[in-house]
Image (tube, rainbow, N blue to C red):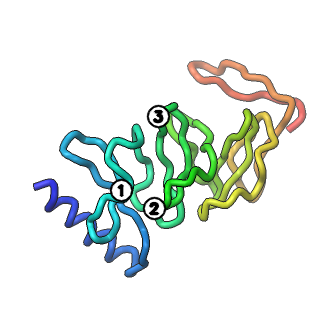
Amino acid sequence: MRKILVLILLLTVSASCNQQKNYLILAEDADFRQGYLNQNGDTVIPFGKYEMCFTDTIKTFGIVLDKTSNFVAIDKNENVLFEVFKYDNGPDYFSEGLIRIVKNGKIGYANEQGKIVIKPQYDCAWPFANGKASVSNNCKVAKEGEHLVWTSENW
């Protein structure tokens, strides 16, 4: 039954990708471990290698949770491109085509093609909105209800 579901998923994704070649498709094994298959149904990224996979189809890159509990962007060859900023118990969301990334405690931005477009250099950085993002290197963490938020006098 699971092989039939994977086959249906492969056919659906194949049709929706307009016959684009060389992409990977998220699948689960009988133990609910996730991995990635190619268009032929061959396992490319083994089931259970990553704790969780957040991208259903890897065209240029996918976001996975690695064994050290970091959200990382990987390409189809499993090269780590960058670490993704943690937001709301998961990886950050794309906003205006950009996602926040982290390196050495600093925040920057990458685009939907997996290219770093603003190198990590800020202590705090909000998602882009209307072509701009609030960033600061002089911020504090404040509690707002049950959430923590950044405050700064120098955005």
Dot placed on the residue nearer the N-terminal end, 3 or 2: 2
* Displayed quadrant of residue 154: top right
Residue at 77%, 54% (x, y): give it: 118
C-alpha distance separating marks 1 and 3: 17 Å
- Check the image and report above or below for 86 versus 139: below
Find disc 3 in the rendering and name its residue: 67
On the image, the x and y values in percent for residue 149 come to 68, 27
Find disc 1 in the rendering and name its residue: 36
On the image, the x and y values in percent for residue 148 come to 64, 23
Left or right for 134, reference 101? right
**Which marked residue is nearer to the observer: mark 3 or mark 2?**
3
Give the SS element for disc 1: strand
Badge 1, how many Cα within 10 Å: few under 14, some, many 20+?
many
Label 3 sits on what residue type?
Lys
Label 2 sits on what residue type?
Ile
Q: Quadrant of the N terminus?
A: bottom left
Residue at 31%, 58% (x, y): give it: 43
Look at the numbered discs 2 and 1 and tell me whether their residues touch, using CB distance below 8 Å. Answer: yes
On the image, the x and y values in percent for residue 109 come to 71, 51
* Displayed quadrant of residue 86: top right
Find disc 2 in the rendering and name its residue: 58
C-alpha distance separating marks 3 and 2: 20 Å
